[in-house]
Image (cartoon, rainbow, N blue to C red):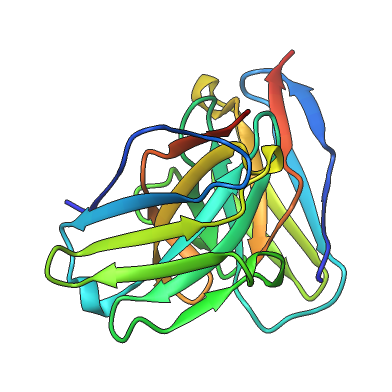
Amino acid sequence: QVQLVQSGPEVKKPGASVRVSCKTSGFTFTNFGISWVRQAPGQGLEWMGWISGYNSKTTYKEKFQDRITLTTDTSTTTVYMELRSLTSDDTAMYYCARDIRSWTEDHWGQGTLVTVSS
Amino acid sequence: DIQMTQSPSSLSASVGDRVTITCRPSQSMSASLNWFQQRPGKAPKLLIYDASTLQSGVPSRFSGSGSGTDFTLTISSLQPEDFATYYCQQRDNFGGGTTVEIK
């Protein structure tokens, strides 16, 4: 079955970077893209970016353009999300999700809580 | 940026009620309009895509309709497991969410 398993919680200081992994299984990795969505505590969903499993092409939300990088490792079918220059506003649950088609996420990871605190 | 306006932001309903949630994008886009359900502490779950196509495994009491700048999610007969928050999405934009609570 389709699974996306994310890395564990992170605590970072302001100004630091965080890297979250999303290990996928149960489907042909190169046939799909992976999106990243975050959710601040008690808030709604915010789409961050997308990467193709086929050719690693990326699309980023403009507000994250300068400090987010998505990468893939096709040998382990894992996607990585790096977010730099963290502030307390980046404290959130971060989700990876498989795209069954453009802008439509059908399977989600369990989420990774990133806490930014001095 | 496209704004996705959901209404209401919350509602109280009873088991068996018919519930309707509206999503209005600030402009019309040629992209799938999706609906997600999120229970507390869980990841979102895709319910409907392309405005009206039911995702595999989703109960038929959920339905979607609409086009352009006016979309609707309907739950025909609310069940206990449907008490959750619902989000619409189009491209890289999510609505603010509608929380369905027990009356």
- The quarter of the rendered structure image containing the C terminus of chain A is top right
Task: Name, please, the residue furthest toward the left.
Answer: A75
Task: Name, please, the residue furthest toward the top.
Answer: B103
Residue A108 visible in image: yes
Tell me what residue is drawn at x 42 percent, y 46 percent.
B58
Residue B55 visible in image: no
From what the image shows, is residue A96 above or below residue B7? below
| Residue A52 pos. (x, y %) | 37, 78
| Residue A110 pos. (x, y %) | 37, 38
Tell me what residue is drawn at x 65 percent, y 53 percent.
A46
Q: Quadrant of residue B27?
A: bottom right
Tell me what residue is drawn at x 60 percent, y 29 percent.
B84
- Using the image as rendered, state which of residue A77 and residue B31 is in the foreground: A77
Tell me what residue is drawn at x 68 percent, y 84 percent.
B30
From what the image shows, is residue B45 above or below residue A41? below
Left or right for A77, reference A70: left
- Using the image as rendered, state which of residue A65 and residue A16 is in the foreground: A16
